[in-house]
Amino acid sequence: MSSQPPYGTPQGGYPPGGGYPPGGGYQGGGYPPPPSYQQQGSSFGDFLAFRKMITPIIIQIIFWILVAAVVLIGFFGIIGGVSMPFGGGEAILGGFILIVLGPVLVRVYCEIAIVFFRMNETLIEIKNALERR
């Protein structure tokens, strides 16, 4: 039986007697690092493999579009109520309520949607930390 390791001959970097170099890590050793130490894929590769989520960014864009729409609809309600000859008070009140509460409700809805993606990111971090052990 040979004294060669089963994975090939080390290229150097190991101190006499085996083991890892001082300070740890894989500094010039002949063996490849384990998968948990290898660098992850590129950002574009992560995007194509659905490991990187773009939906939180899209949700932020949708938030601002919806806030603008709610405020505009509120202003149109107020303008419509003012232009009515009789009984426009309900439209004016509804417009004010929409301008005040509309962005808050849109924000709550978008935050709920983003929470799911944050939970996913946290679970991935936990999974990666457990794999490194």
Image: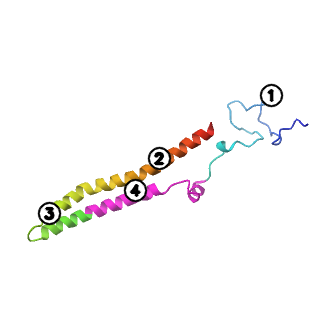
The mark nearer the N terminus, 2 or 3, is 3
Residue 103: x %, y % from top left: 29, 56
- Number of numbered labels in the structure image: 4
Nearer to us: label 3 or label 4: 3
The residue where tag 4 is placed is 60
Q: CA distance from mark 1 to mark 3?
A: 87 Å
The mark nearer the N terminus, 3 or 4, is 4
Nearer to us: label 1 or label 3: 3
Q: CA distance from mark 2 to mark 3?
A: 42 Å
The mark nearer the N terminus, 2 or 1, is 1
The mark nearer the N terminus, 1 or 3, is 1
Q: Which mark is residue 17?
A: 1
Q: CA distance from mark 4 to mark 1?
A: 57 Å
Q: Check whether the beta carbons of the residues at disc 2 and disc 4 lie within 8 A of each other.
A: no
SS class of the residue under badge 1? loop
Q: Check whether the beta carbons of the residues at disc 3 and disc 4 lie within 8 A of each other.
A: no
The residue where tag 2 is placed is 119
Specify start and end residues of the magenta stretch as a single range. Answer: 42-71
The residue where tag 3 is placed is 90
Q: Amino acid at mark 3?
A: Glu
Q: Residue furthest right?
A: 1
- 75 left or right of 10 in image: left
Q: Amino acid at mark 2?
A: Met
Q: Amino acid at mark 1?
A: Gly
